[in-house]
Image: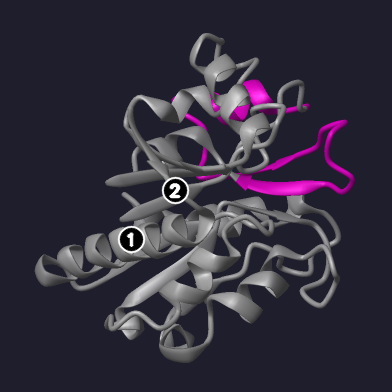
Amino acid sequence: MEFKEYPDREMLALSLADRIASQLAQHLRGNDRATLCVPGGTSPVQVFETLSGADLEWDRITVVLGDERWVDGDHKRSNSRLLRRHLLRDRAAAASYIDLYTGDATPDDATAALSERLAPLTPLTVVLLGMGNDMHTASLFPGADHLQAAMAADAPPVMAIRADGAEEPRITLTRPVLADALNIHVLIMGPEKREALDRAQKSDPMEAPIRAFLDDATVHWAE
């Protein structure tokens, strides 16, 4: 694990956006397409807004969320809604976007088609992960109903998942598709997340799912 500490959140956002843009550009120099996987939530908003203006061949880049709440894309808790507002605009509006919310009655009904759609895009070029104070990442929550299956080496790329810590049913990318990414970044901010990261490093991935990705990740932290 590489740990990078920044003097403030603005510097973190600028540096991380530049790092992600560089990795995407480098990949596109030798490949037809690149794939960027990002988290929801408010922590990465500054990164998204900076990255949206990056001088990249966005029409050759596919963007996908690491997880989504099973709510309509206009719902205030939709990660897609946040992404459209802060990342999929400016130059990045030209990117292809795979929406994990399909409109099916349940996320379970959508997993097979989404897994089939995502499989040709692997390995993902860049994955940006967040982390909760409970050490979850994506919708891989400790104690979730299908966590063991989602963390297994033979898990499909996408699974439905439900947990006490999640208000709605979720759909999430699984451990193997996230862990096999060419570049993994973890974004955390504040003292509570720093303390959670320290705990996660000493924990089993079933108790701290973020632990499954730390060895190959660059962790970006600011107070």
Q: Which residues are magenta?
A: 145-172
Relative depth, front residue between 37 and 133: 133
**Considering the image in quadrants, where does the C terminus appear?**
top right
Where residue 146 sits: x, y (%)? 71, 28
- Looking at marks 1 and 2 on the same chain, the residue that comes earlier in the sequence is marked by 2
Which residue is rendered at x = 35% and y = 54% of the image? 126
- In the rendered view, tell whether residue 118 sits above or below residue 148: below
Q: CA distance from mark 1 to mark 2?
A: 19 Å
Q: Residues within 10 Å of mark 2 (few under 14, many from 20)?
A: few
Colouring style: one colour
Q: Please, what secondary structure does the residue beneath circle 1 have?
A: helix
For residue 186, side relative to residue 216 (left or right): right
Q: Amino acid at mark 1?
A: Ile
Q: Please, what secondary structure does the residue beneath circle 2 have?
A: loop
Q: Which mark is residue 20?
A: 1
**Mark count:** 2
Where residue 76 sits: x, y (%)? 85, 69
Labels 1, 2: front one: 2
Q: Quadrant of residue 55?
A: bottom left
Residue receiving disc 2: 7
